Image (cartoon, rainbow, N blue to C red):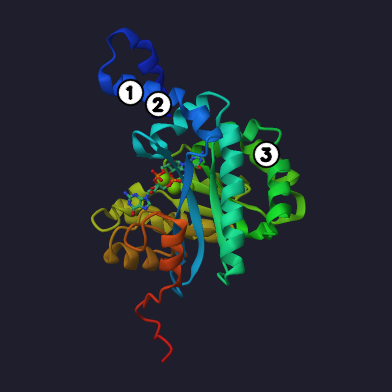
Amino acid sequence: YQAHTELRDLHIYTPSMDSAARETQALLGELGPALEQGELRLHYQPKVRLATGAVEGAEALLRWQHPRVGLVPPGRFIGHAEQTTLINPITHWVIEAALRQLAEWRRAGLDMGVAVNLSTRNFSDPELAGHIHRMLEATGVPGGCLELEVTESAMMLNPDRAAAILSELGDTRVTISIDDFGTGYSSLAYLDRLPAACIKVDQSFVQRVETDNGAREIVRAAAAMAHAMGMEVVAEGVENARVLDLVTELGCDLAQGFHLCRPLPAPECRSWMEQPRGFPAAVPQPA
Ligand code: C2E
Ligand code: MG
Ligand code: MG
Ligand code: MG
């Protein structure tokens, strides 16, 4: 929650703000209108099954196409949206846009799912489950193809709300994944209490597996424990071929990262997903 603290500090320092801080504050004031005016965009980053190379889904990642500033990454405005109630309409927009995109891809024959990121604050949105129900119905996407990514810290702050939302989602088969796993305060022993189908091992561990034995053993242990609880394991932030091999050896089921594919606008992401990739190298390509 460091981002929140920084944003609060910006407000306190108003009289002596430097120009970058002033620009950020001005920008945040425009977020509400930006949502209304359709300036938000989603980029998509594929999740690939390590054993087969199949694209199993894509994560929707929010961007703000600002007419003057250009493409603004979520790190610059999500914290602010979380402090206000803007995060709720923004999340509703993300869910609708991601499900519409997924419906289009599935109609085009791509057998895949989509993941959206939730904020802690979304947990107290009484409309969230209803909105998801309506959007699944409107788009015809099976609920089993929608994954909600919740950070480990948000999950630990509200373990009961996560379970409550799942129960409000009833028999839709929507799943929850624990994002940035390893960066929160939960211990592996808590895993069996979390209503999640999947953990995403944080990129800070994944990126260190090449050089750091400790990180390697943490990934191995997290994967083993998650499997014992019936969960799947995603390695996020895979940046090179060596790390891809290592996370496979360490027991991860899926991977995501710049080495495979960067987050891309939907048309470019679709081209990547439809291309033969010759991955994993061990699987012979049909002649
Ligand atoms: P996250 O959900 O953990 O997403 C992964 C972030 O890591 C993304 O940054 C992605 O672009 C980046 N990434 C992916 N592969 C690699 C890699 O190989 N190396 C490195 N260095 N980075 C990689 P992005 O898109 O800037 O998003 C940052 C965070 O903002 C996300 O972290 C998520 O917590 C939040 N966020 C993004 N979209 C949404 C949204 O729609 N709603 C909410 N509430 N939060 C969002
Ligand atoms: Mg995520
Ligand atoms: Mg993540
Ligand atoms: Mg992360």
Amino acid carrying label 3: it is: Leu
Residue 283 coordinates in the image, percent (x, y) = 40, 82
Which residue lies under the disc numbered 3?
128
Which three-letter amino acid code belongs to the residue tagged 1?
Glu
Which residue is more in the foreground, 102 or 209? 102
Q: Dot 2: what SS?
A: helix
The disc at residue 123 is none
Which residue is at a point 35% across and 39% down the rendered structure image?
70
Position above or below: 78 against 98: above
Left or right of 195? Residue 10 is left
Q: Mark 1 or mark 3: name the one nearer the start of the chain.
A: 1
Ligand 4 is in which quadrant of the figure? top left
Confirm or deny contact between disc 1 and disc 2 (CB under 8 A): yes
Judging depth in this view, the residue of 240 and 73 nearest the camera is 73
Label 2 is placed on what type of residue?
Leu
Q: Nearer the viewer, mark 1 or mark 3?
A: 1
